[in-house]
Image (spheres, rainbow, N blue to C red):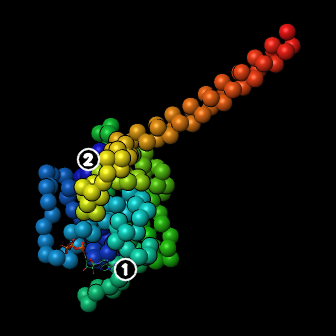
Amino acid sequence: MNLLEMRIKGFKSFAKNTTLNLNSNIVSIVGPNGSGKSNIVDAIRWLLGEQSSKQIRISEKADVIFSGSEKFPPAKKAEVFLKIKDDNGKIRTIGKILTADGKIQYKIDNRNARLKDIFEVIGGAGVGKSFYSIISQDQVRELVSASSDQLRVIIEDAAGIKTYLNKKEIALKMLNQTKENLERLNDVLYEVE
Ligand code: ATP
């Protein structure tokens, strides 16, 4: 998946409709302290369903809505739209809108959608619970100080094999249960014979 363009309006410090062209080899975003650089990353995380308030640096859900300034009144809603090229080369626009009454609406190509649908469009890679496609300063600290066991869990999670390990565990349990049932059945058969 490639990020092509981002549109933010009423999200955190972005009072006005702001379009960022990501369709180039951006390696860094520079600007004075407090100018909103991290808010851009927060916007991507927020759109992709980040559940941790800490990760997007808010206390309450409504904190992402622009709270007003000397020049601009508070926004009525926060909107973030991302134009992406999916893994099949198709251009899609995914979005999220939060209104002041607390309602959240996800969008795909201007149609209402669920977060689950958004995950399908972006292919799930590196997003979801742990968001390893976006590494925060906290995560760098976590990685550097992790024990080898913790590191293994992190790497398994990032590689997306955790789901398969869980499935394997369930399958092995079922296999054992079936083995026990077979043994019991053999006992019954032995007695009948
Ligand atoms: P630094 O270089 O210091 O890390 P930064 O460029 O990454 O800064 P951000 O952390 O992205 O800056 O932005 C912080 C600014 O966003 C602060 O000025 C803060 O007041 C503003 N801000 C955050 N949430 C809101 C909101 N809901 N409404 C208005 N402004 C907000």
| Image point (85%, 15%), residue name | 191
- Mark 2 is surrounded, within 10 Å at the Cα level, by few (under 14), some (14 to 19) or many (20 or more) other residues, namely some
Where residue 33 appears, x then y in whole percent? 16, 76
Is any part of residue 30 visible from this angle? yes
Left or right of 81, for residue 184: right
The residue under label 1 is which amino acid type?
A: Ala
Q: Secondary structure at mark 1?
A: loop
| Image point (86%, 13%), residue name | 192
Q: Does label 2 or label 1 sit earlier along the sequence? A: 2
Quadrant of the rendered image holding ligand 1: bottom left
Report which residue position mark 2 lands on.
2
Where residue 71 appears, x then y in whole percent? 25, 87
| Image point (28%, 76%), residue name | 13
The residue under label 2 is which amino acid type?
A: Asn
Q: Judge whether 96 appears above or below 175 on screen.
A: below
- Mark 1 is surrounded, within 10 Å at the Cα level, by few (under 14), some (14 to 19) or many (20 or more) other residues, namely some
Q: Nearer the viewer, mark 2 or mark 1?
A: 2
Residues under numbered marks 2 and 1 in contact, where contact means CB atoms less than 8 Å apart: no
Does ligand 1 reach within 8 Å of label 2's beta carbon? no
Report which residue position mark 1 lands on.
75
Instruction: Give the total of numbered labels.
Output: 2
